[in-house]
Image (cartoon, grey):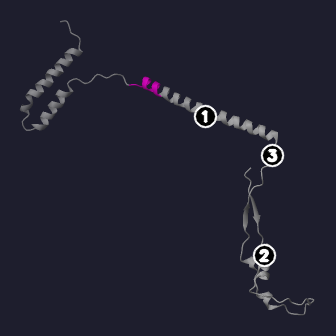
C-alpha cells in the first residue's frame, strides 16, 4: 500500500504564478492599457520582445504526494494475507530445521572422516635420543671424534637391544 504520487508543475503554471505575483507586488504599479484592436501593420511593443519568460529559467518541479487513505480490504484479500503469514511462519521453521540438520550432517561427516582416514599407529623409531646425541657429539668434536666413543657405544647398545626385541629368538 506504499504507493507514492508525484505532481508535475508545468512552466505554464509557473508563468501564471509569476504574473500574479507581479500584479500583487506594490513596487511595480502598472497602468491599465486601453484595449485596442490588433492590427498587423503596427509594430509590437519592445518590452514584450525583450522579456524572457520565467519558465525558461525554472525546470518543472516534482513534489511527493502522500498516499491516499487505506481502503477497506476485501475479505478475499484478508484471507490471502493470513495464508501468506502462515506460510512465512512455516518457512522460518523450515529454515531453522534445515540449519539444525546441516549442523548434524557436518558433525557426522567429520566423525566419519576421522574414523575412515585416520593414519594407523606407527611405532616410534627406537634409539632416537641416542642417535641425536651421537650426531651432536660429532658436530661438537669434529676435530677429535674419539671423544664421542662413549656416546657411540650407548647408541650401538641401544640399536643391538632394539634388534633383539624385534626379531624372534632363533634356535641354533
Rendered view: 60 above or below 134: below
Q: Residue 41: horizontal and vertical position, in percent?
A: 90, 93
Q: Nearer the viewer, residue 25 or 119?
A: 25
Q: Residue furthest top?
A: 171
Query: Which residue sits at x=62%, y=32%?
Result: 93
Q: Residue 17: horizontal and vertical position, in percent?
A: 78, 76
Task: Name the element at disc 3.
Answer: loop
Label 3, label 1: how far apart the Cα atoms are: 34 Å
Label 2, label 3: how far apart the Cα atoms are: 39 Å
Query: Which residue sits at x=8%, y=34%?
Result: 145
Marking on residue 81: none
Rendered view: 163 above or below 128: above
Marking on residue 72: 3
Mark earlier in primary sequence (2, 3):
2
Q: Residue 169: horizontal and vertical position, in percent?
A: 21, 9
Q: Badge 1, how many Cα within 10 Å: few under 14, some, many 20+? A: few
Residue contact at pointers 1 and 2, CB within 8 angstroms:
no
Marking on residue 17: 2
Q: Nearer the viewer, residue 136 or 2?
A: 2
What's the magenta region? 110-118
Mark earlier in primary sequence (3, 1):
3
Q: Badge 2, how many Cα within 10 Å: few under 14, some, many 20+? A: few
Left or right: 7, with 132 as reference point? right
**Which residue position is annotated with label 1?**
95
Task: Name the element at disc 1.
Answer: helix
Q: Nearer the viewer, residue 49 or 141?
A: 49
79 falls in the magenta region: no
Query: Which residue sits at x=24%, y=16%?
Result: 166
Amino acid at each position: 500500500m506504499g504507493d507514492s504520487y508525484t505532481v508535475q508543475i508545468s512552466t505554464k503554471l509557473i508563468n501564471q504564478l509569476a504574473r500574479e505575483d507581479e500584479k500583487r507586488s506594490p513596487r511595480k504599479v502598472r497602468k491599465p492599457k486601453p484595449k485596442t484592436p490588433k492590427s498587423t501593420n503596427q509594430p509590437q511593443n519592445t518590452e514584450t520582445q525583450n522579456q524572457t519568460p520565467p519558465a525558461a529559467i525554472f525546470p518543472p518541479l516534482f513534489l511527493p504526494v502522500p498516499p491516499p487513505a487505506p481502503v477497506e480490504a476485501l475479505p478475499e484479500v484478508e484471507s490471502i494475507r493470513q495464508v501468506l503469514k502462515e506460510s512465512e511462519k512455516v518457512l522460518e521453521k523450515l529454515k531453522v530445521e534445515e540449519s539444525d540438520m546441516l549442523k548434524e550432517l557436518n558433525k557426522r561427516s567429520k566423525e566419519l572422516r576421522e574414523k575412515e582416514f585416520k593414519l594407523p599407529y606407527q611405532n616410534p623409531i627406537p634409539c632416537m635420543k641416542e642417535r641425536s646425541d651421537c650426531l651432536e657429539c660429532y658436530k661438537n668434536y669434529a676435530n677429535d671424534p674419539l671423544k664421542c666413543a662413549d656416546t657411540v657405544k650407548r647408541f650401538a647398545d641401544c640399536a643391538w637391544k632394539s634388534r633383539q626385541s624385534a626379531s624372534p629368538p632363533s634356535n641354533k
